[in-house]
Amino acid sequence: MTIPNSEDFLSAGSCLPCTPEEEKETISELMREAEDNVKDGDLYYLISYRWWTDWQKYVGLDKGEESCSESLLHIPFRPGEIDNSKLVLDGTKVEDEPDLQRNLQEGEDYTLVPQEVWRKLFEWYKGGPELPRRVISEGSISKNYIVEVYPLCLQLVDERDNSQRIIRISKKASVGELYSMVCALLAVEKTKVHEVHIWDYFFQTKHHKLTNFDQTLEEAQLQMDQEILLEVQANKLWSSDFGTSSAGNELALVPLEPSTSSMTIAGGPTSKDYSSGFGSNFLQGSSFSSALRDVEDSDDNLNNGVKVDGQGLTGLHNLGNTCFMNSAIQCLAHTPPLVEYFLQDYTEEINKENPLGMQGELALAFGELLRKLWSSGRTSIAPRSFKAKLARFAPQFSGYNQHDSQELLAFLLDGLHEDLNRVKNKPYIEAKDADGRPDEEFSDECWKNHKARNDSVIVDICQGQYKSTLVCPVCSKVSVTFDPFMYLSLPLPSTITRTMTVTVFSGKGDALPMPYTVTVPKNGSCKDLVKALAVACCLKASEELLLAEVYDHRIFRYIESPFESLSDIKDEEQIVAYRLPTGHERLLRLEMMHRRTDRFLLEPQYNLQRKLIGTPLITCIDVDSVTRADIYAAVSSVLVPLLREKAFPVNHTKLSESNGCGPSLDAIALTENGIPSEKELFTSIMEVEEVPDQLPPFQLALTDEKGVSRTALDSDPCHFTGSSMRLLMEWSDREHETYDFNFLEDLPEVFKSGFMLKKTRQEAVTLFSCLETFLKEEPLGPDDMWYCPSCKQHRQATKKLDLWRLPEILVVHLKRFSYSRFMKNKLDTFVNFPLHNLDLSKYIKHRASSVQSHVYELYAVSNHYGGLGGGHYSSYAKLIEEDKWYHFDDSHVSPVSEEEIRTSAAYVLFYQRVESNSKIENEEVSSCTNSPSFFMQGLE
């Protein structure tokens, strides 16, 4: 679909709306009204996100997000027709009921607007196709309204002739509504002479009849793209003349017309057109079930062709992009203390009164799943019941989009903890400060308070404690807290730091411009950048660095605040630093811009059109002596390093003798105040030709901040006031022959993403370097400011973490994914992590904890393959009783060698503590500790 321009739009007879401001006010009011009165069954419409952002720019809703430079260049245009063609499957005709593309992301591919907003936008702009979706409520404790973008898609199999049809229906629809829809679609009805049944036909296997008409399809555990079977009882429905219409023709299966019922919401994914890059069990052009027929349950104890014996080797079916869930579950299902706990009777610990829990339903569903995984005689199972419970209490995991295995793991552990919390009535405990008490005393108090409100098997085995120290950058206030943790999220070194390239210029002409690439904290401030540059360029004690952003060959802005966040500096910007004397704020700053002289355009009105060239130079002079001679002398001094060797061999040789790093001013005759005299430096052109060892003159003029105006500097400035003076230097052929202007051109950008990204991916890091990066002191991000109780203001404090207590099961999350407004990225950096004897003793700051072992053994890994746009999860898990590793890839389970465990796909690592030999009372228990059995943990 082609988006018309404004002229085409008007000629087409579209309704011309009000002004952009009136459009914005109308839509904003409709949006507020809809959000305040949202309820089940409301209609929302999908709109192309690209069109929506164009409209926002047109009416001025995005001005706050644009930079000053962008807003100056941006001229908003009225968008054309609403174009949703990219959201629907290719080949969908306008008159057809449109099918959505799979894996569309809100905020990237589409946005959702209420029905009244859609009607108003459609009235103004026309276009389409229309993509309505209904609001449903999620959650049993507190209602959370969401728009069901992808309704449930089911394959209806007619047992009479094995024909198949795709139907779409809301997961909140009842079984009774499904019956009505199927019977109407296939022109059958239940009478006294025949029975009509619908079977849950998951994996083309009859599981159970759908008989509870009041039950929702979600509660019935029907999954996206699965089959349901229509069964008409034999010999009661069909007769020799039944099945024909009144016209004598065979019964034609004609789809119903779309309606506003929740059963027939337009659109939604269809299995026939679905090809996902996430799930390994989805095939192009095939239905969900046919793609998985090779992994059907059977009685031969085979697992997709791999014969396995023993317990703990059961695979999990992929229910539709659920590999992330399967990977996390398999890791937990091979966590020895959890398996021992859930294989026993734990019902007495279920907390049905906890408002933060799920009344025990999540724990019961997880426990039942673990029992199935560890029961013998199974090859693979479908975790439909568990997923239904998960989606019911965690709407973010409903549907069939890909999610993050670590996010699911965090929710699951927290949900299990609340369901199994032994504390029925949580006491109120007021948080207190350390007030100078020793860390050991204060940490014990914090842990005791935490245990008074949180006491479960999850806390017993999975939770540790770390020390957090915050320091205010202004008043140096120190705040110490001790907080529990469930897992360690370790950043890869390249995700917490940032490389920046900045060109350093000398403000007194003693060195050539030089670019420096430094590494700074990603959430750091400009003082971190200045500090790193000072070390890199060997800054003297008598010098300071002044940062500036160069844009269009002029100083766009000075970066003078040391607390300005580095996140404000984008990779594509050009940043320079000027070496100026200490206390330069008290001096007059001379900012010199450059412009090439055009000998053919001598008229002033033409000269104003010439563009600036090169990079501005900056120097300083005393505010008490602002004469023409002082200005020319200062500018000449800063240009000295650019002198060409062939232009003035005598002076340049003398200039170079005193400074091995570059030319200096030693060869120039100085006055009493150390400044070259005007007579020695600047003469007329004829005088220069007569005296070839003198520097040539050049044209200087006063100008404005953009270098447009030009006032000749023919005499001393009269009563000059201000902190800076902008000068414009004309570069003729003579100046280009005298000075090497190449040093002022081709200013590098802050960061070259392509080159550095390749370099980063090739670097290998260790788990210890990730841990050290995590524990390293760093400033808080600009969006995570700390309220200083002393300053009474939010400050970008520095934060330092220390490990204090470690749990029995240590979960380590490698932060491979990074998200920002401008970029999404995944790091495939290989992290070298130990499989045995992970010793964390030197990282523990709690002295009293030395009696406990800090050595760990790896037993499971959750892997992520691929990138952000498409990927797949699997897991490695160790059967500790057998001391063997296995690869769990959804339904596929296969042996794997220990050497294959370390890969660049490792995402979440699971370690178990190994007790020290001093705590082992006999050799038998020591043997169990080195290779523990799931059912022998009680001996320890």
Image: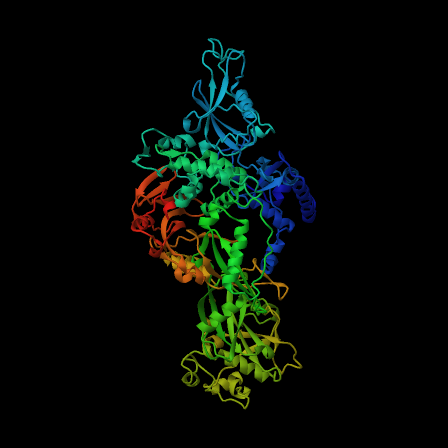
Q: Nearer the viewer, residue 858 or 145?
A: 858
Which residue is more in the foreground, 602 or 923?
923
Question: Looking at this rendering, what residue extends furthest in the front direction?
Answer: 921
Quadrant location, the N terminus:
top right
Colour basis: rainbow
Q: How many marks?
A: 0
Rendered image quadrant of residue 172:
top right
Q: Position of residue 516 (x, y in %)?
A: 44, 69
Of all residues, the one furthest to the top in this rendering is 240
Residue 763 % position (x, y): 37, 58
Identify which residue is drawn at 47% across, 36% down: 365
Q: Is residue 788 visible?
A: yes
Q: Position of residue 581 (x, y in %)?
A: 53, 79
- Name above or below for residue 859 compared with residue 281: below
Q: Residue furthest bottom?
A: 672
649 vs 363, nearest the viewer? 363
Q: Is residue 327 above or below residue 212?
A: below
Residue 749 can be seen, yes or no: no
Q: Residue at x 62, y 66 (%)?
A: 790
Residue 332 image-quadrant placement: top left
Task: Residue 745: give x, y in percent of width and height.
Answer: 47, 69
Which residue corresponds to the image point at 40% horizontal and 62% vertical from the top-left? 842
